């Protein structure tokens, strides 16, 4: 029988993160296909109040590690507790999932490297299915595998989606961005039917090589583009950092509006990472998305295609964004956006005078 | 000046990678796929921040601190090592071997770990290893932490700023919903976010030096080391396709979802914008700031 489907929970200030609940929802489907239990590791301090939320999201088994040193996420103590516990298992988990957050991307590769297993980053779809490996330089890989974790993600800068799998070794691992999966409907379940196990915490001196000096949470929480109604996003086509000033001016005409950016604009340093939309940034669903100088590569598209209305402005008539936007304007950002600001401001005056 | 930080001589490494250049249209096929042979190449943008971090770390270390840039890739990837030398990196090393083809992150981390081990053994124990947060072609951010697991280095990811004082790294890193300041013991591996300082321009001296190295085999031997898997003592079975626990089993094209994009035909910016705004006037008015 296939091993468990394990979600390693993430928590901030003792509250289970939304991405963990989303993964439990998706993990439930995988576990049902495998006929395996859906399990969740909770690491933290005084986390008992969170057990009910994890049960309602569908978990069959909960493993809980409680220790003051686990209150805030730290690479080595978390690594120690998870690996110590998994090393005692006779059958490793079939699947191990974590959020593709700053935490998941810090910890999941440690677990993967320890078990020397595969890890697919920033997955956008998961499933269980068969795979037959027929030929290859390595004969030991040949075989038929009825139950593989399928992890689909866009391939680099291309309009291709790739299915990545690695059935040769469990756990088969993947990280998934927050917002990719829906929050699951509440599962009615008796707490007594859920197996809750305490995990031993035996930290070693070498696990304390990194000390937390200070946590600064309030200051960067101002930017949450995933909650905005209107996003004015810029891409590499803006040509310079100055372009974002123009986008900010347009955004300032709307309520609950922010600027966003494609990965290329973030990579070159025109705007910081919290504004990034796409597979490796935020997944957003605003009412109005104005894409300026964004080509619409798949990696961007998966993060914004569920927007209610997309207005795309690009000087390249063949840009892929014109295949899925609501409105397309082929033109120069530096002519179109100032004109849009002018007309939107004029609309505003009309609205006020009415 | 460096004595202000009260650090020993620091032995610093920076891991860099050559990636396809997607800023230009070269090598991009009509269907959106990429022809890697035709596409231009560039230094992974994140690695420019890692290089700047390594140079700043060296300035904080003792007078005999040094930096070695390490890459893995086909022979033409030495281009980015020349780039590193131009920016003032002291030494460079490329791991190049046909058996490395089709490496996933685990196999890449193994090969790079073995290369680092080989360099540590010869040149002394490391104090700092810098990596870019992630590459723009793989986007995984996994190789840095996987190397930490193999080499047991202190791990700090998403570093936005740091200083080293009394041989302790004081770093500010991105966390969910904010930032965290940590104090990390050496030897440490730091993955550097693109909110760190931008890489300074090459100096004239650096540019001249690169020209000298390009002309002189003797200087190439000294500053541009080429190694293969056998030299670094790596096990072939853990490298390349054989050492990769994952494969791409299939790829498929994404059709044009929707495909109902209304392309506006106005003759001027004024007409185009007015067409779009009148088509969406209700939506626009709903969120208009009054």
Image (cartoon, coloured by chain):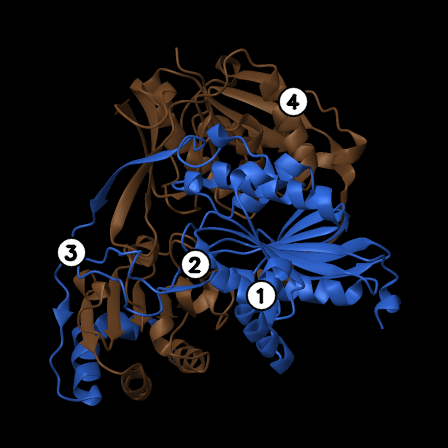
Chain colours: A brown, B blue
Residue in the image at 31% along x and 56% along y: B36
Are discs 1 and 3 located on one and the same chain?
yes
The residue under label 2 is: B76
Secondary structure category for the residue under label 4 = helix
Q: Looking at the image, which is closer to me, A262 or B56?
A: B56
Kindly indicate the quadrant of the structure image that contains residue A295: bottom left
Residue A84 numbered tag: 4
Identify the residue position indicated by label 1 in the image.
B84
- From the viewer's perspective, is residue A298 above or below residue A33? below
Say few, some or many: other residues with alpha carbon within 10 Å of mark 4 (under 14 / 14 to 19 / 20 or more): some
Q: Residues within 10 Å of mark 1 (few under 14, many from 20)?
A: many
Tag 1 subunit: B
Q: Mark 1 and mark 3: span between their CA atoms?
A: 46 Å
Measured in 3D between alpha carbons, the distance from the residue under mark 2 to the one under mark 3, in whole angstroms, is 42 Å
Q: How many angstroms separate mark 2 from mark 1 (CA)?
A: 14 Å
Q: Mark 4 to mark 1: distance in Å?
A: 41 Å
> Where does residue A186 sit, x and y in percent of width and height?
40, 31
In the rendered image, is residue A352 in sight? no
- Of the residues tagged 1 and 3, which is closer to the observer? 1
Q: Are marks 2 and 1 in contact (CB under 8 Å)?
A: no
Q: Residue at x 58, y 77 (%)?
A: B207
Q: How far apart are labels 4 and 3 at the CA level? A: 49 Å
* Cβ atoms under marks 4 and 2 closer than 8 Å: no
The image shows residue A67, relative to residue B56, as above or below, that is: above
Find residue A99 and report its horizontal and vertical position in percent.
Answer: 48, 41
Q: Chain of mark 4?
A: A
Q: Position of residue B247 (x, y in %)?
A: 35, 34
Along the viewing direction, whichever of A278 and B238 lies nearer the viewer: B238
Residue where numbered disc 3 is placed: B258
């Amino acid at each position: 029988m296939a091993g468990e489907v394990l979600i390693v929970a993430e928590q901030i200030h003792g509250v289970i993160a939304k991405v963990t609940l989303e993964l439990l929802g998706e993990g439930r489907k995988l576990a049902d296909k495998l006929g395996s239990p859906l399990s969740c590791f909770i690491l933290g301090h005084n986390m008992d109040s969170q057990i009910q939320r994890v049960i309602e999201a569908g978990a069959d088994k909960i493993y809980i590690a409680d220790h003051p040193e686990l209150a805030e996420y730290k690479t080595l103590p978390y690594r120690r507790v998870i690996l110590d516990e998994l090393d005692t298992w006779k059958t490793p988990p079939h699947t191990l999932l974590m959020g593709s957050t700053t935490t998941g991307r810090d910890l999941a590769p440690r677990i993967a490297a320890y078990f020397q297993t595969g890890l697919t980053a920033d997955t956008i779809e998961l499933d269980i299915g068969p795979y037959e490996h027929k030929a290859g330089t390595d004969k030991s890989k040949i075989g038929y595998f009825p139950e593989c974790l399928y992890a689909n993600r866009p391939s680099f800068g291309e309009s291709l989606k790739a299915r990545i799998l690695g059935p040769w070794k469990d756990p088969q691992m993947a990280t998934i961005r927050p917002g990719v999966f829906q929050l699951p409907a509440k599962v009615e379940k008796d707490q007594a039917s859920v197996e809750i196990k305490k995990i031993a915490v035996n930290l070693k001196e070498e696990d304390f090589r990194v000390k937390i000096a200070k946590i600064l949470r309030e200051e960067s929480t101002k930017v949450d583009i995933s909650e905005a109604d209107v996003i004015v996003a810029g891409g590499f086509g803006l040509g310079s950092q100055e372009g974002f000033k123009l986008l900010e001016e347009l955004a300032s005409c709307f309520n609950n509006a922010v600027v966003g950016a494609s990965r290329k604009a973030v990579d070159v340093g025109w705007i910081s990472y919290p504004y990034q939309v796409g597979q490796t940034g935020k997944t957003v669903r605003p009412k109005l998305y104005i894409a300026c100088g964004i080509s619409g590569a798949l990696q961007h598209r998966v993060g914004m295609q569920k927007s209610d209305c997309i207005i795309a402005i690009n000087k390249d008539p063949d840009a892929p964004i014109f295949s899925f936007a609501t409105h397309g304007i082929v033109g120069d950002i530096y002519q179109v956006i100032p004109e849009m600001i002018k007309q939107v401001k004029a609309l505003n005056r009309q609205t006020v005078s009415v | 000046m460096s004595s202000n930080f009260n650090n020993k001589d620091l032995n610093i490494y920076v891991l860099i990678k050559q990636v396809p250049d997607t800023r230009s249209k070269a090598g991009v096929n009509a269907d959106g796929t990429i022809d890697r042979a035709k596409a231009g190449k560039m230094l992974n943008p994140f690695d420019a921040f890692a290089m700047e971090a390594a140079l700043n770390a060296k300035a904080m270390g003792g007078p005999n601190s040094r930096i070695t840039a390490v890459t893995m890739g086909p022979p033409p990837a030495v281009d980015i090592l020349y780039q590193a030398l131009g920016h003032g990196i002291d030494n460079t090393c490329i791991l190049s071997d046909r058996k490395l083809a089709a490496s996933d992150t685990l196999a890449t981390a193994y090969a790079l770990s073995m290369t680092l081990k080989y360099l540590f053994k010869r040149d002394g124990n490391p104090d700092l290893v810098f990596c870019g947060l992630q590459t723009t072609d793989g986007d995984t951010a996994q190789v840095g932490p996987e190397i930490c697991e193999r080499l047991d280095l202190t791990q700090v990811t998403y570093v936005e700023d740091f200083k080293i004082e009394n041989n302790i790294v004081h770093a500010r890193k991105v966390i969910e919903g904010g930032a965290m300041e940590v104090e990390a013991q050496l030897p440490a591996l730091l993955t550097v976010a693109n909110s760190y300082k931008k890489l300074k321009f090459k100096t004239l001296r650096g540019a001249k030096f690169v020209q000298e190295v390009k002309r002189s085999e003797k200087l190439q031997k000294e500053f541009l080391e080429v190694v293969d898997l056998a030299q670094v003592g790596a096990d072939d079975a853990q490298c390349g396709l054989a050492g990769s626990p994952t494969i791409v089993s299939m790829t498929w094209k994404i059709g044009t979802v929707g495909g109902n994009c209304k392309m506006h035909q106005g003759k001027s910016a004024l007409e185009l914008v007015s067409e779009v705004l009148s088509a969406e006037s209700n939506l626009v008015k709903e969120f208009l700031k009054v």
